[in-house]
Image (spheres, helix red, strand yellow):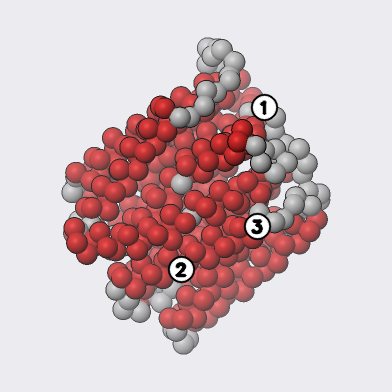
Amino acid sequence: MQIQKILPILYIGLFTVFDPIAFDFLATALPLIANDLRATPGNLTGMISYYLLGVGFAQLWSGEFVDRYGQRISVRIGAVLFLLFGALVAFTQDLYLWYAARFVMGMAVGLCITAALSLVRENYAEDGGKILSIIYGAGNFVGVIAPLLAGLLISYYGWHSVLWAIASWGIVLVYVAFLLFPHSTVPAPQPFSWHYWIDAYKHILSVNEYIIWALLSAFSYGAFLAFITGSSYVFAEGYGIGSTVYSYMYSLVILVFVVGSFMAERFEANDKLLRVLKYCTIALCLGSAAIIANALSVQNFYILVLMILVMSFTTAILIPHGMALALLPFEENKGKASAGIIIMHVIVGSAVGWGVTIGHHPYGMMIGIGMLLQALAIYWLLGRVKRMPVA
């Protein structure tokens, strides 16, 4: 592959790895943070949900911003905000100030991800699913290593060191955004028009294929978020697992996600892919049901972990293909279309996260219910697919 084709992959991967860093690196420290800040399980979900709300809020304007001003200025602004407010998160011990700073970090992440996803449609139209699978797989190696590194940092320096490590990633992003990121070719900015903005989103939402595949990706993300929001308390309270063992288990889940992402790269956007997605959805349904049954009966730690690994593998295939297929019909407005996908991710993910936490069950029943509801919605969406989209 020519260097001109490789470089966009590297930039997309660099700026979409925000999410694994914002979630996975923090996962091991969350129970300790909640304890020190006197937070309840609901507060713990708030730590994640305010970040997600920031990501979602960014999508209300980031798509228009990326389409009008290009990816380069977008990632510069996002990288600076991530660095500054990541440092603020590390400094403060006030829960509500922490929420506010995480909200701004979420906006920074949302802006950068929108810019990065628009590069996929711009540079790899027909191979978008493959490219996103590669990026998700490579990027989530961070998620494999992050909990282990976080555990070591906590052991020696306390949980604040994890927050400083997250903020430090902003330094890398600022360097790349200002010194290495290529210039974006965009039309001269025109005065903002609400009429144009609304019409553009009306056009995007009128594409039935976009709705189906964007929602499929969002529900798959929701299934994975059910694990993220519920697992730390379930494993600590229900199964008595310490932070070190939890970090190993979390890394294993992300490693399986990486394997699934690289497996997903092998499939073309055709009827064979549709069958693969249906098989993954059935496996997700069965695994979710097994988690519920395990919570109500034997309450076996290894069964729970095995079924979570099934979820990780299947969502690793579903998420990137759903996103790529949703973007495929668009030559224009790709930034807004990318933003729409992320908004769906945020809405579904936040709803699942709050539901899992509010229904707090020590042996993971709510995790299983959250995953099962997403899997059933995905299966219903796949039943509505008449044909695979083409560029």
Instruction: Say which of 238 and 113 sits in front.
Output: 113
Asked whether disc 3 touches disc 2, contact meaning CB atoms under 8 Å apart, the reply is no
Residue 96 appears in the rendering: no
Percent position of residue 97, x then y = 23, 42
Indicate the secondary structure of the residue bearing disc 3. helix
Q: Is residue 296 left or right of residue 171?
A: right
Name the residue rendered at 39%, 50% in the picture. 21
Give the mark, 3 or 2, whose residue is nearer the N terminus: 2
Asked whether disc 2 touches disc 1, contact meaning CB atoms under 8 Å apart, the reply is no
What residue would you read off at disc 1?
332
Q: Is residue 59 left or right of residue 243?
A: right
Indicate the secondary structure of the residue bearing disc 1. loop
Name the residue rendered at 62%, 74% in the picture. 286
Q: Is residue 95 left or right of residue 46?
A: left
Mark toward the viewer: 2 or 1: 2
Q: Is residue 18 left or right of residue 243?
A: right
